[in-house]
Amino acid sequence: MIPLFSQNSLKLLESLSFTDTLYAFDYDGTLVPIVKSPVKANLRPSTELLFRELCERVEVAVISGRGIKDLSARLSVKPQYLAGNHGLEMSGKSTKSMEKAKRDCSQWVRRLKKISFPQGVELEDKKFSLCLHYRQSRNKAKAKQVIEAAIETLSPKPRVVGGKCVFNLVPVKAPHKGVAVHELMKKMQAKHVFYIGDDVTDEDVFSFPSDRIMTVRVGKKQGSRAQFYIERQSDINRLLRHLLRFHPRPVKVNK
Amino acid sequence: MTKQNHSFFSLLQIGLSIHHVNKLSERRFGMSLVQWCLLKQLLDRPASSAFVLAKATGVQPSTLTQTLKRLERKGYIFITEDPRDSRKKLISITRSGMLGVKRVRKALLGAFPEMHRHYAVLGKVEKILLRYTNESHRL
């Protein structure tokens, strides 16, 4: 992995602005900082301003583990594309896999509600996938143990994607973020994609077999398949400013 | 002269003329046709490998290497390490290269305003020649 803000990396980022590029962002941990309660994760005012400006100039997508309804409610700025539930839920699209995911999730919720979890473990039902958060647990190791044991009892078996103090449960063979990015690329006929994320679920994009995706991770991590990284989430404004510099506002011609 | 013989002579003239146009274009506009085509590909495919570029343009690897060196010297492209494999190199166009592509395209359109009308014929000739080069091992 190479720092995104190095001279050559920025030149590469600039070269994306010469062609039809889709700029895609993960939400939690990327556009917004990770917070104790998922309910309180909102864009900082400075980021909102820059993000709004970017959405007006280029094609932007937000691809998140959150549901689209939740995502949409948090974004006062509406990007052109939204994908929720780790790529399973795309705006305006209802599919067989979504219906199956809904059924699987209902079964898991029914089972998990019967289990007594340690204090601080929170079950988030996103309709098409589930999250088991344990950030607020005092004994995280114990909470993790209990959650892992609970997941073993679920049927059908979910695909478990770990994250920052969270277990994401998605149906096996459900589309993931990599598939969502690829679908969006086809939909808007983009020649290239820029994608930035911070978590294990974003590795599905980082490892997607395509030479037309520039991938960036928030935070350097050994073993990540991302090509570039920014040091921390608070660098997001710096990234947005660079992108705005590469895509200047078109000059209005007075007729 | 028979039609076939005439065709072969025309092919020769076209080949020689293209070589001449290439040189003239570089002298006049700062960029040959080959260079322009490579840069145009890079415009749409940032961070390409040499292999991908050669395949996309049909340029021979030996020609490609020389052309890329010239483009890099002119500041139209830059070459970086592949972040995933430092043994591999990735080629991208610079802002200067992007502006050069637009400028030269405009100049070429000015120099050959009717070229687009013969697009279909040029396409046919290209197919015939490609078939010949692909099947040349049979001759």
Image: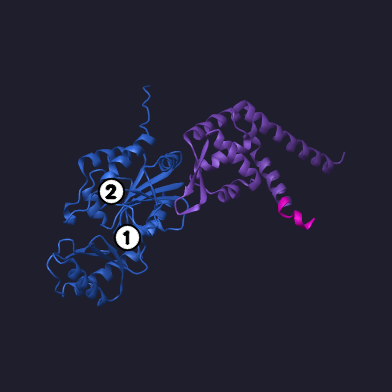
Q: Is residue A172 left or right of residue B30?
A: left
> Between residues B56 and B106, which one lies in front from this camera angle?
B56
User: The C terminus of chain B is located in which quarter?
Assistant: bottom right
Q: Which residue is mark 2?
A: A232
Nearest the eye: B82 or B6? B82
Please state which of the two labelled residues, at mark 1 or mark 2, is closer to the viewer.
2
The colour one sees for chain A in the rendered image is: blue
The location of residue A246, given as percent across then percent down, is 39, 36
The answer to whether residue B37 shows anywhere in this view is no
Helix, strand or loop under label 1: helix
Measured along the vertical axis of the image, is residue A1 above or below residue B41? below
- Left or right: A120, with B6 as reference point: left
* Residue at 31% from the left image edge and 54% from the top image edge: A198
Q: Which mark is residue A211?
A: none
Find residue A200 and name its label.
1
Q: What distance separates the C-alpha of mark 1 from that of mark 2?
A: 16 Å
Main SS of the magenta part reads: helix
Magenta stretch: give its range. Answer: B133-139
Determine the residue positioned at 70% across, 35% down: B19
Rendered location of residue A127, percent (x, y): 24, 63
The type of residue carrying mark 2 is: Arg
Whether residue A100 appears in magenta in the rendering, the answer is no
